[in-house]
Amino acid sequence: MKTSDAHHSTASCRHLSRRRALQYLGALAFSSVLWGCSPKEARQAIGRAGQVLVDDATDSAVAHIPSTGLDEVDRLVHQQIREMARKIADRWGDERVASPREYVKYTDDYQTRAIVNFDEGVVTVETVRQEQPRMVLEEAIVATLLTPKDPSTVDLLSDEDVTIGAEPFLHGLVLDHQGQPIRYEWRATQYARYLLENAYQHTRQGQRPKHWVSFAMEKDYQNRQQLQFYDSVHKYGGEYRVKTSLIYAVMEAESSFNPYAMSHIPAYGLMQIVPSTAGRDSHRLIYGRDGTPTKEYLFTPEKNIRMGAAYLSILNDRYLAGVRHGLSREYCVIAGYNTGSGNVLRSFDRDRSAALQRINSMSPQQVFDHMVKHLPFEETRNYIQKVVAFQKKYQ
């Protein structure tokens, strides 16, 4: 997700997907060291970044921040990212940071990290620290198992330690060697020591050894995650007249139910909301006034789900309201959530009225098949197929 369709009215973005347009225009770009490009490209991307990102401002204050240009918050964030990129490259020689489907948290001066892959259901804790690596791993495993459920309390863009004590986000998703859920430090420590005895591995990472353990989440971990969000999905699906099956399917496609989901656009949370675009559209619908949701706001699952449901309703009731058949419109909404309604309509005709007329002359299956073949980006062509397939599981 996602940007507002107003953002795509500019000629410069006309042929770009939402994600690519944001990147091109300078949305907060995480360095290539972090996101799969070269270090040089990382520095270039950061240098281009110019989108406002506000984490701690109130909604009323945010409403007055211009949509372009750097403020002090931006400069501090960009400085933080540059430093983080350099340290990760120096210590690890790879490009691993948090993404929509993967939680990645660094600690210990970026020498230790935890990775939770929500696609594969695997947790890896590893370190390149050479002094007492087993002790370092034990502490990191405990911290990972007890990382709190509230993503707003964990800084993924620093090496700050995680403060434990609140209910862990892996509680019930990971069971220990005795088949028990891990809620408290004594059990987490016991399991960490078991893992170090039975799953410890090491190899050479560049010029230094790497030490790690990996362990699986429960087989039904995704079902368990879905159930956590049941009340919010049904509440806001009803409020904004959006099918709960569609909300769940979009959530799975966007984040694999990772509450810490974060992309380089940046987009945050379960439904991958871009604060300054789709976030502003949804804020206006929800609160009746302009405003931009903060990162902390979007990392709160209930609020993120509310914004995602609101934006799906905006696509359905406003941007794509001219599509008469309900199922055809739903297919267009799904594609629009990924690439914007403008790109959806242009795949049928460059003229909006002609595009709507053509869509309304087709059956829903013809509309779906046309988009799978003619949407301008492979990402969106795959996205619509995934969401439609996922949706069948939740109907």
Image (cartoon, rainbow, N blue to C red):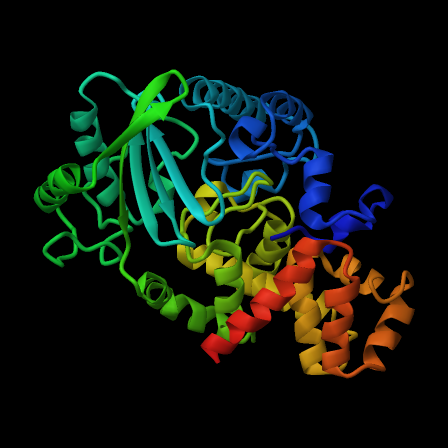
In the rendered view, does 336 fall on the left or right side of 210?
Answer: right
Estimate the x, y position of residue 209 in percent, counting from the top left: 31, 21
* Residue 239 in view: no
- x 87%, y 65%: residue: 352
Occupied quadrant, residue 322: bottom right
Estimate the x, y position of residue 242 in percent, counting from the top left: 56, 73
Rendered view: 236 above or below 114: below
Q: Nearer the viewer, residue 321 or 13?
A: 13
- x 17%, y 33%: residue: 138
Q: Nearer the viewer, residue 394 or 62?
A: 394
Q: Nearer the viewer, residue 307 or 256?
A: 256
Estimate the x, y position of residue 4 in percent, counting from the top left: 69, 53
In the rendered view, does 190 fall on the left or right side of 267?
Answer: left
Q: Residue furthest front?
A: 203
Estimate the x, y position of residue 283 in percent, counting from the top left: 58, 54
In the rendered view, does 252 fall on the left or right side of 117?
Answer: right
Rendered view: 357 above or below 260: below
Rendered view: 352 above or below 243: above
- x 55%, y 24%: residue: 78
* Residue 6 in view: yes
Occupied quadrant, residue 20: top right
